[in-house]
Image (cartoon, rainbow, N blue to C red):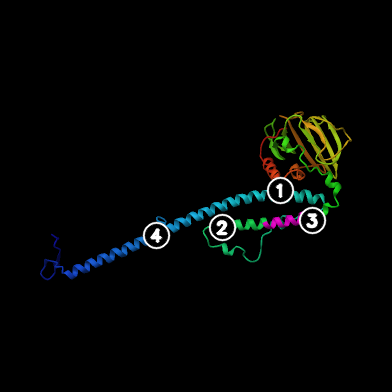
Amino acid sequence: MSKVKYYFDHETLSYRPIKLTNKNRVSNFLLFILSSFFLAFFSLFILLNSEWINTPAEIAQKRLIQNYELQFDILNKKLTQIETVVDNIEERDNNLYRVYFEASPIPEAQRRAGFGGVNRYKNLQGYDNSELIINTAKRLDILSKQTVVQSKSLDEIERLALNKAALLEAIPSIQPIKNEDLTRMASGYGYRIDPFTKTRKKHNGMDFTAKRGTPVYATGNGIIKRADNRSSGFGNHIRIDHGFGYFSLYAHLSKYNVRRGQKVKRGDVIGYVGNTGRSVGPHLHYEILKDNKKINPLNFYYGNLSPKEFEALLTMSKQQNQSMD
């Protein structure tokens, strides 16, 4: 039995039962259904526009966006690697090739200049990942321009090189030990840990570890200026005067087969890897000097290394490890 509802009658000051007609019942029922429908529609609208519930299309879209973000991340890592190699090529171009041929270095601003005027990236703005996309597009544009500038520079160097045959033969431009004979490239040019004092110290050359007796090659045409063991720390060592202000040094040899005043050509065997002097293991310590200033030998290995081999050598040379001498 349904409960009887009452209302207070102010005229009689008494409670009277509420009498519901069929019409009232139908009206109340329809009102309840309509209210429930609007409440359900409103709740569904709120849920669909919240982060709690995603439609299949939104889920697929989020996965697609995450995949794009991953691909952009991989692309940016590859760009970083390419930029490192291009930066090294530019350094060699300004400090090596253009110096060789007495050409003015290309200013840094010219190599990395942006693109003024109209906003080239306006159509990429207004998205959730706009900053990532625009940054990647800018890096690609700058890298493309660097490549064009470098290509034109090398064309100029090629023209200048036609009259510099003697200089090119003299420049120490190959690795002093063949790749197949190397155990590893132990230490590069720059500040490294001294193996004896365990402090950071300027390492003025590159250390190549190889078996004792491994052949060491002259890296350019020149004249032997020293072949002895009378220099502190170097042990048996050789110094070659290549002319044009260039010298190369080969230290810690087990023995040498050249003498002072002897003319040598690039690729001649001048000695053998050893462990003499201030050394902690069999290796070759190799230096290059230009106008009595010690410079990074890494910039000179364009004569016998492929781009892939050079990139691997570049990576190893930057490791902040302990030198061998």
The residue pinned by badge 3 equals 156
Is 115 on the left or on the right of 242, as rendered?
left
Separation of marks 3 and 4 at Cα, in angstroms: 63 Å
Q: Please state, as top left, top right, bottom left or bottom right, where the C terminus lies in the image.
A: top right
Circle 1 residues within 10 Å: few <14, some 14–19, many ≥20: some
Q: Position of residue 199 (x, y in %)?
A: 68, 34
| Residue drawn at point x = 75 percent, y = 48 percent | 92
Residue bounds of the magenta highlight: 144-157
Q: Position of residue 109 (x, y in %)?
A: 71, 57
Q: Please state, as top left, top right, bottom left or bottom right, where the N terminus lies in the image.
A: bottom left
Mark 1 and 3 residues: CB-CB less than 8 Å, in contact?
no
Q: Regarding mark 1 in the picture, which secondary structure is present there?
A: helix
Residue type, mark 4 in image = Leu
The total number of labels drawn is: 4
Where residue 249 sits, quadrant-wise, is top right
Q: Is residue 90 magenta?
A: no
Separation of marks 1 and 3 at Cα, in angstroms: 18 Å
| Residue drawn at point x = 76 percent, y = 51 percent | 94
